[in-house]
Image (cartoon, grey):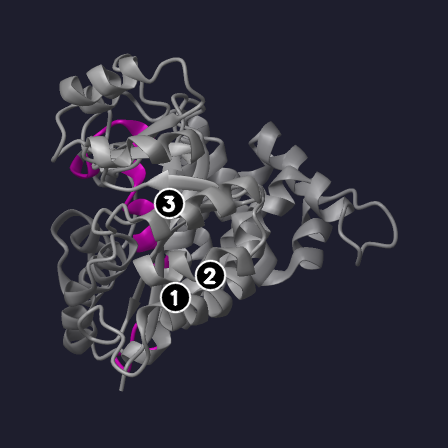
Amino acid sequence: MTYSYIARQPILDQDKHTVGYELLFRDGPNNTFPEIDPEQATSRLLSDHFLSTHYETLGDKLGFVNFPYQSLINRVPTLFPSDNLVVEILEDCPPTPELFSAVKDMSSAGYKIALDDFIPSKEWKAFLPYIALIKFDIRQVPIEKARNFILRLSGTKIKFLAEKVETYQEFEQAKRAGFDYFQGYFFSKPEMITRKSIAPSFMTVVQLLTEISKPEMDYAAIESLISKDVTLSYKLLTLVNSSVIVKSKIQSFKQALVYLGEEKLRKFISLVSLASSQERKPDYLYGLSIQRARYCELIASQIKTKLEPGQAFLTGIFSLLDSLLDRSLEQVVAEISVDESIKLAITKNEGVLGEILLLTKAYEQAQWEDVRRYCQSIGVDESVLSQCYNASVKWTADLLNVQHE
């Protein structure tokens, strides 16, 4: 039995805003396509995933997609709209006359073409006028070497992307070297560990998150927490009054909570709470923590061990608090009253919750062999992973839309 997976990795600009996602595919156990040739497989995966789920979740962001050589020659990318697709030419594609002709055609049809894991060589020189973006893996081509190449092409319209940026130091260095875009895990690691006390409003947020993770929600406790925080109160009433189900304006929080119901309330609190923490953090971090929470929750609901999905939801959300607060997870969990199993999961990856978190992180980073191993360990059927991931991505997108309306 083979399953197709898709994960997405964010691409950020110099201000750490998300401009797009690289969509990473896997089909079958060894990243191979056993029964069909690669370009058919690419088309199938694109139509299954990119068109069905990811167009609505990409929003105004770009989707970066790798295309095998033959699919480029066959102009497969032209099956998809050009407005938010970036066509990546893999590093193992030979720069043949056929490829040159295809690139020229697609570029003149409005497609953005990128050279992935680029190593400068004279064979590619003729392609450059038709290339919108060049990606350098800074593990293969050091930032200094890439900088010289970027300087030589400074008169062109080509943008440059640094891949595998792991630390803030590398991010700053790549920025100075002239890179426009960045991909890597620097954004989900704390910038610095400083002794920053948690502001009272953030403590309210943590208490709210704890309340919504309980099987039976205590509306009175939630109401008293929300009513203490002006921003939360305002946002809650705005959300409820903009809802189609409301016939007359809602005046009290009690009314608002009843109207929203448990599911919507949980969504609302997750989102607003994170958005109210640290303004200067990459927007992607908020989305990722909510998406991760939802994915953990959906995975938890699929396993036979008696586990409260709400706990998995909190595990996902809290797993990024170190990055949102620039403090170690140990410091953060010491100050919040949350179940011991959640603390152990996020600080030491212990227990079933810890394994669910490891599975989620492996999926986000497209480490498919690890994904398979954790699935077997916690007893999750591999066939549901893609479904749960797509559902979590869509859920987060819906939530963020509510926030921006």
Q: Which numbered disc, 3 or 2, marks the residue closer to the eye?
A: 3
Snapshot quadrant of residue 100: top left
Q: CA distance from mark 2 to mark 1?
A: 8 Å
> Magenta residues, as a range?
302-330
Label 3: how many residues lie within 10 Å, few (<14), some (14-19) or many (20+)?
some
Above or below 131: residue 378: below
Residue 331, can we see it? yes
Q: Which numbered disc, 3 or 1, marks the residue closer to the eye?
A: 3
Image coordinates of residue 213 in percent, x first then y, are 41, 58
Residue found at x 38% / y 55%: 293
Image coordinates of residue 126 in percent, x first then y, are 34, 33
Q: Are marks 2 and 1 in contact (CB under 8 Å)?
A: yes
**Could you say which is closer to the camera, residue 251 or residue 302?**
302
Of marks 2 and 1, which one's residue comes earlier in the chain? Answer: 1
| Residue under label 1 | 42
| Residue under label 3 | 100
| Residue under label 2 | 76
Magenta region includes residue 315: yes
Dot 1: what SS?
helix
